[in-house]
Image (cartoon, rainbow, N blue to C red):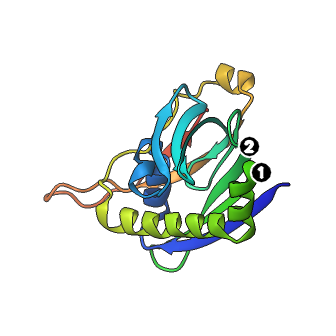
Amino acid sequence: MMHTVTHKIIVNVPIETAYDQWTRFEEFPRFMDAVTQVKHLDERRLLWNARVLGRDITWEAEIDRLVPDFAIEWHSTDGPQHRGAVRFEPCAGDGTSVSVELDFTPRGLGERVAAAVGLVNLKVEGDLRRFKEFVEFEAQEAPAWHPAPLTPARVDASPVHIEVRERQVSPVPAWSEKPKHHTRRDAVRV
């Protein structure tokens, strides 16, 4: 039986910062309580390791859709069966609404009981709270992970839904310069 968990939190950073931090998958253990390691296997696949209910588990997840500053969607290809999405929406001021939806199938009695009594719900809520603290106070400015550059031939060959959107980039001006606003096309291929 499939269970669904949804949570939303407002983080006090611009949407680009929230998205960029979320796409640094290797840093997930810093704010996701059960996750011990995440590794890129290739442009689309990630290998996850976690400790759940006292057991070490491993699974692969494949990114299905990646829209810069808007959404990431994935599904597991082995291990615990699940799929999910994280969406980013601008909100008042410079804040960002981060929404997580996770559909999963509990395995074994322990996981079914944990899902039934809401423990998975509490885990996701706690992970989002820790993400908020992390992105607002601890995260270092660095670019997001982006897969290999997108070319027309790769778009045609890609099994992943790809969207291209404009992103305003405001570089930090030198002391003698006035701020300039540049537009950069963000195209991401996964």
* Apparent side of residue 109 relative to residue 94 in the rendered image (left or right): right
Q: Earlier in the sequence, mark 1 or mark 2?
A: 2
Residue nearest the viewer, comparing 133 with 80: 80
Q: Is residue 98 visible?
A: no
Residue 133, position as x, y percentages in the image: 38, 69
Residue nearest the viewer, comparing 181 with 138: 138
Q: Which image quadrant is residue 188 in?
A: top right
Q: Secondary structure at mark 2?
A: loop
Quadrant where the image shows the C terminus: top right
Quadrant where the image shows the N terminus: bottom right
Q: Secondary structure at mark 1?
A: loop
Q: Is residue 181 above or below residue 116?
A: above
Residue at the (14%, 58%) spot, across then down: 176
Residue nearest the viewer, comparing 141 with 63: 63
Q: Bin the neighbour count of mark 1 within 10 Å (Cα to Cα): few under 14, some 14-19, many 20 and up.
A: some
Q: Bin the neighbour count of mark 2 within 10 Å (Cα to Cα): few under 14, some 14-19, many 20 and up.
A: some
Q: Is residue 79 visible?
A: yes
* Residue at numbered disc 2: 81
* Residue at numbered disc 1: 105
Residue at the (50%, 55%) spot, across then down: 19
Q: Is residue 109 above or below residue 64?
A: below
Residue 117, position as x, y percentages in the image: 71, 71
Residue at the (77%, 51%) spot, across then down: 105
Type of the residue with mark 1: Thr
Residue at the (74%, 54%) spot, across then down: 109
Type of the residue with mark 2: Gln
Given contact means CB atoms under 8 Å apart, are the residues at marks 1 and 2 in contact? yes
Q: Which image quadrant is residue 177 in?
A: bottom left
